[in-house]
Amino acid sequence: MMILRKDPIVKKIFIVFTVTIIAFGIAMIFNNYFFIEELGDNGVKISAVYGFMVKSIIIVVLMIVISISSFIYVLKRIIGELDKISFEIDRIMDGDFSAVSDTNEEGILSRIEFQFFQMSRRLQINLNEINDEKENVKSLVTDISHQLRTPLSSIKVFNSLLLENGISKEEEEEFLNRIKNEEDKLEWLLNSLTKISMMETGLIQLKKKKDNIKSTIIEAVNGIYLKASEKGIDIKMNNLQDIYICHDAKWTKEAIFNVLENAVKYTDENGEIDISIEKLESYIKIDIDDNGIGIPSKDIRKIFDRFYRGNSERVRKTQGSGVGLYLTRKILEEQGGSITAFSKEGQGSEFTILMVL
C-alpha cells in the first residue's frame, strides 16, 4: 500500500478533492458574511444572524470532515485492492502462480481482481502442462534409447563374428540371417516409435469423417490374415453390421490391427479369434476375443502402458516391444474412445473397444 500512496496520480486526486471541498466551504462562509451585512443594513438583529453564520460554518466543517473521511476510506479500499493485485503480480514474476481470489464483492475492481486470478490459474495450468510434457519427452527419449540398444547390440555382435577367421559357410549364412532379422526388427521398431512420438507431440492430426466401421475392421483383419493362417488360427467376424461413425479410418484400422496382432501372437496354433460389433445408445462396442494363453492379473492393467511387456516365459520368447497396445490406446483416446481388457490366464483374453457414434 505504501507504494501506491506515493503514486503522483493518487496524490493529485487527493489534493484536487481536498481543495474542492475547502473552496466550497470558503465560498459558503463568504456568502453568509455578505448575507449578514445585507441583513444588518436592513435592521435585522445581528446576534441572531451571527448565530446562524456559526451554525453554517459548523455544518460546512462537518461536511468537509465527512467528505474527506469518506474519500480516504474509499481510496484506502481502492489502494488495498490494487496493492493485492500488485503483490500477486510480483509473485507471478517470481514463478509462483498459486494466487487465490478471496473477494465476493461487486464492482469493477473486484471484477478485475477476479479476472486476474483466473488468468493466474490458467498460467498455472499451462505451466503444469509444459512441465508434464517435458517429463513425457524425457521419458520417451529414455525408452527409445533402451529399445534401440538391444537390436543394435545384436547386429554388432554378429558382425564381429562374421569378421572372425575360420567360420564355416553355414555359420556365415546363419549370422547373415540373424543380422537381417535384427535389421527388420529395428526397422519395425523405428516405425512404431516414430508413430508414438508423433502422436504424443501432436504432430499427427487425426482426420475424422463419417465412415463405415465394418469396412475399417475388415481391412484390419485382411492385414493380419496371413499371419493367422500360418498358425491355422481362424478369425470369425460375427454380427458385423454396417455402422457409420465419425472416425479416422486409417488410424483406427491400425489400432484394431494391433489388437488382432497381439491376439495372433499369443494364441496357439489352430486357435480362434472372434470379432463382433454391437450398436448401443451413444456408442458402438467392438469385442475381440481369443482363446490364447491369457494375461496374468498382475499385468492386465499395465498392458496399455508404453513399452510394457509381461514377464512370463511365453512373452519373453515372443518378439515384441510393448508399443502396439499403447499406440492403440492413444489412437482411440484421441477420438474420444477407449479400450479395456479382461482375461484369465490360460483361458484367453477379451478386448473391448468403445467408440462414440
Image: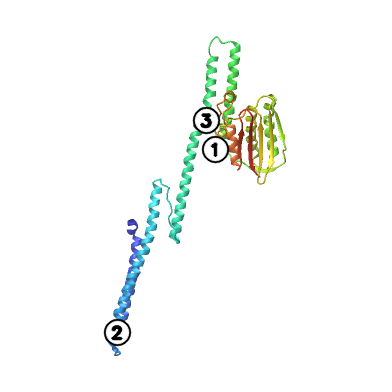
Tell me the distance, in whole angstroms, between the alpha carbons under discs 2 and 3. 100 Å
Q: Residue at x 60, y 18 (%)?
A: 177
Category of crowding for the residue at label 1, using alpha-carbon neighbours closer than 10 angstroms: few (below 14), some (14–19), many (at least 20): some
From the image, which quarter does the C terminus lie in? top right
Q: Which residue is mark 1?
A: 200
Tell me the distance, in whole angstroms, between the alpha carbons under discs 3 and 1. 13 Å
Residue type at mark 3 is Ile
Q: Which residue is mark 3?
A: 144
Image position, residue 150 (x, y; %): 53, 24
Is 227 on the left or on the right of 16, as rendered?
right
Category of crowding for the residue at label 2, using alpha-carbon neighbours closer than 10 angstroms: few (below 14), some (14–19), many (at least 20): some
Describe the element under mark 3 as helix, strand or loop: helix
Which mark's residue is nearer the viewer, 2 or 1?
Answer: 2
Q: Which residue is mark 2?
A: 49
Describe the element under mark 2 as helix, strand or loop: helix
Category of crowding for the residue at label 3, using alpha-carbon neighbours closer than 10 angstroms: few (below 14), some (14–19), many (at least 20): some
Q: Residue at x 51, y 28 (%)?
A: 146
Q: Residue at x 27, y 86 (%)?
A: 46
